[in-house]
Amino acid sequence: MKAIRINNTGSPEVITYIECEKPKPSVGSVCIKNMAIGLNYIDTYHRTGLYPVSLPTGLGLEGAGIVEELGQGVDNVNVGDRVAYVSGPIGAYAEYHCVNAQKLIKLPDFISYEVAASLMLKAMTVRYLFKDIYSIQSGETIVFHAAAGGVGSIALAWAKAVGTKVIATVGGEKKCDLVKAKGADYVIDYNRENVAEKVKEITDGKGVPVVYDGIGAASLQWSLDSLARRGLLVSFGNASGAITNFDFSRLAAGGSLSVIRPTLADYIPDLESLHNNANDVFDMIKNKHIDVQINATYSLKEAKQAHIDLEKRKLQGLNVISP
């Protein structure tokens, strides 16, 4: 089969396109023929070593395809089932991938492989952020950073369906126009405006109860300064670099603030929680609350270019790799 490998961490130049042996499923796992592969910013964290990986390694956590072979002891899926997976193991950038059967999501007929691979990880991330970490409510106002990306676009749609107002932050005039079109109630260009001052202006000086921040180090101070007393900062990504040497006294000074650094995997540890999350996503798609249009498609051989475009912020919305 064809697959992507990296032997060292670093820039997109470390990505290699190889031919290797098709994997065999171990006990409790299945071999999936990938029909579409998810392209996510977390893939760049593995490639650069920001999130440590054992080398050499593949890349990619998300995909959708057809169950081709069952390992011993698998009884929750059958050969031929249409499935998706969102939490690894790493190595989805390949024609075939073996996945723990307990991590598989059966796809309803109305969701294509391309939509599942490009959307499920992002949408399930939004779902756990908006329901498990902090339950957003109709009528309240929240902040969501980098709202023009794939997760941000889904977050805007999800919040609109709930009735929650979103202050969306983005970098650049084009992205401001994009998130306005996608339903953001307020838009702040963090390249030109003081985010916290604008948030306080919009909220009559109160701040917001929660800030969702996937940017990381560069946006930490904006996020803390945008919160109301006893507010929550949900730091769920490091696009600008990891936060280090954090002084917890800043939380007290800001008004008894809280910070959480969650990961999706800890909120879908078993089939029940996985399916509860996925079913909510399916409902959002079925009721047409989430836009399922694919923005860009790359071939497996073009994975290096896909990572270049990701890191240069050229991609918005949903993007996919075709094996």
Image: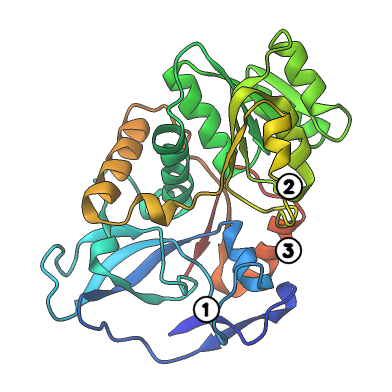
Q: Is residue 133 visible?
A: yes
Q: Which residue is mark 3?
A: 308
Closer to the camera, 231 or 318? Answer: 231
Residue 146 position by quadrant: top right
Q: How many marks?
A: 3
Q: Amino acid at mark 3?
A: Ile
**Residue occupied by mark 1:** 58
Q: Residue placed at 25% from the left, 74% from the top?
A: 30
Q: Residue furthest right?
A: 192
Q: What amino acid does circle 2 point to? A: Asp
For label 3, count other residues whose C-alpha is less than 10 Å away and answer few (under 14), some (14-19) or many (20+). Answer: some
Q: Nearer the viewer, mark 3 or mark 1?
A: 1
Q: Dot 1 lies on which element? A: loop
* Left-right relation of 67 to 160: left
Q: Which residue is mark 2?
A: 247
Q: Assign a secondary structure to mark 3.
A: helix
What is the CA distance from the residue labelled 3 to the residue labelled 2?
Answer: 34 Å
Q: CA distance from mark 1 to mark 2?
A: 36 Å
Separation (CA) of disc 3 from disc 1: 17 Å
Residue in the picture at 71% in, 29% down? 254
Find numbered disc 2 in the image and state the secondary structure of the residue it sits on.
loop
30, 194: nearer the viewer:
194
Residue 238 x/y as whole percent: 67, 53
Q: Which three-letter amino acid code belongs to the residue tagged 1? A: Gly
Asked if residue 68 is positioned above or below residue 238 in the image, the reply reads: below
Q: Few, some or many C-alpha atoms within 10 Å of disc 1 (few <14, some 14-19, many ≥20)?
A: many
